[in-house]
Image: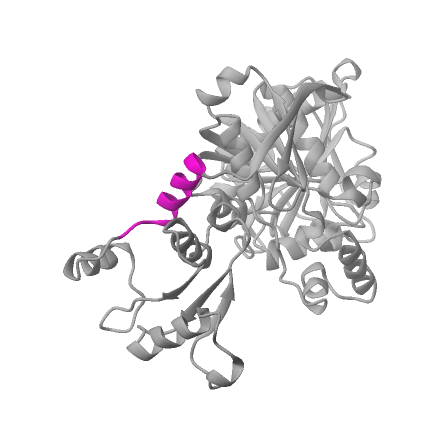
Amino acid sequence: MMAFASSIIPSISSWQVGISLINPATIPDDLVRPGHIFPLRARIGGVLKRAGHTEAGVDLARLAGLYPAGVICEIQNPDGSMARLPQLVKYAQEHNLKLISIADLISYRLKYDRFVYRESVCKFPSQFGDFQIYAYCNALDKTEHLAIVKGDPAELATKPVLVRMHSECLTGDALGSMRCDCRMQLQAALKMIEAHGLGVVVYLRQEGRGIGLVNKLKAYTLQDMGLDTVEANERLGFPADLRDYGMGAQILNDLSVKQIRLITNNPRKIAGLKGYGLEIVDRLPLLIEATDYNSVYLATKAKKLGHLLLQTYLITVAVSWQSETTSPEARYEKLDKIRYLAQENGFLVQEEARPIAIALFSNADLIFHLGFDQINLANAYWYQDCEHPYLQGVMGILDNLVASLNTSRLEFLIAPGGDPMNSLQIKLDRQNYSLSQKPSALCNTIESQIIYSFSRIETYNN
């Protein structure tokens, strides 16, 4: 199944070349090389596998009962720019052409032409809660996929549903690898859905961002030699990310999900799900712990793959709670409240689990950073202005934590923009205060490289 692309509005010769390429009787000597027509291979499954123009061109030919191939081109405006939808509508009207979108084609195929089928449903009690697990089979390649579902199935069609699209990672999910954050993402998503009471984790069998287990391990070898995760994939001849979410969209359609609150740090997943009859009403970030093993990996995902992870750091916060409230369920409930407090102020939350941080904050129940997913959004001295909106937002969150959540100790370290764990002085000062005092009262004296500690012990620093 092929499509042929021209980078200009095609001339008659372009169409003739495309038709010749499709003709089964054409032999190599019939064609001049190199030429100006570029062959593209459509994914098996068409737009239900990948929502692309190549797949759309082939699908249209197949649905019309023709040979599954086509010629696609980019239509240009008179000034040489690419025509967008308003210009294409006008162009179609002027030339009496039919116009549909890829979303229209996907909707049609979802109604009449599926390739992912439900095979089984059973109860799934787990350490994260009680779920139902649905098994699916891809009729095209015989791969098997799962949906882990929480809540009343009837509500999936009528309410916004928490959804996590999770790609299989044997080394992380099952074996506990510290080189990636996959297991932490899966567990965090299940905890979020259990706490919410309604949601779906779609577990897709596309190991190693789509390159397979063996190739992923080869990429690890290259990373051991100094390459990052993107460079390693590219050295092996693969794109940085080969995953597709058409299978997941079909699974959600089978479950009658219409509106989703997508649990992801990856904006590409948002784009990958659009057009499948799904309305993304919200994006919920995953709170992922940075460790000595995955900190470089997380930074690469943020910088090279566009993941919404911290790149500007404002503050590191460590919280301890009274012993009766430190169960996993209670801890997650508090973590979720912190996420919402951060979201209200436009901040991103990222958990911290590196040994240096754990030692620095004396084994606190939770250590996390607040900041932004873009680089250089704060100057090095942002914290010296009490009227600065970042400082006001941070102090508001700290005051809330001191006054609620059964806090027994709260400590924080201001960051000048970069990762504070990478720029620590040999010896840090520590100033002690009572939890009866609001952190915001210190806004005129806040400095970096000082740990401010608030506890129930009435220790004051004059």
Q: Is residue 6 visible?
A: no
Please say whether residue 430 is visible from this viewpoint.
Answer: yes
In this rendering, would 257 be left or right of 72?
Answer: right
* Main SS category, magenta section: helix
Residue at (64, 46) in percent of width and height: 141
Q: Is residue 422 above or below residue 117?
A: below
Name the image quarter holding the C terminus: top right
Q: Residue at x 51, y 79 (%)?
A: 27
Residue 426 is situated, as x and y percent measured from the top left of the image, at 83, 53
Which of the 4 quarters of the picture holds residue 375?
bottom right
The single residue placed furthest to the front in the displayed view is: 25
Residue in front for this viewpoint, 312 or 80: 80
Compared across the picture, whether 195 is left or right of 124 comes to left
Decide whether residue 24 is among the magenta residues: no
Look at the picture and state if 10 lies above or below 454: below
Bounds of the magenta segment: 99-112
Q: Residue furthest left?
A: 94
Q: Quadrant of residue 196?
A: top right
Q: Position of residue 205 (x, y in %)?
A: 68, 42
List x then y, in percent, for residue 80: 28, 73
Q: Position of residue 54 (x, y in %)?
A: 45, 59
Judged left or right of residue 333, residue 180 is: right
For residue 110: magenta? yes
**Could you say which quadrant of the image residue 15 lies in?**
bottom left
Q: How is the image coloured?
A: one colour
Instruction: Tell how many labels.
Output: 0
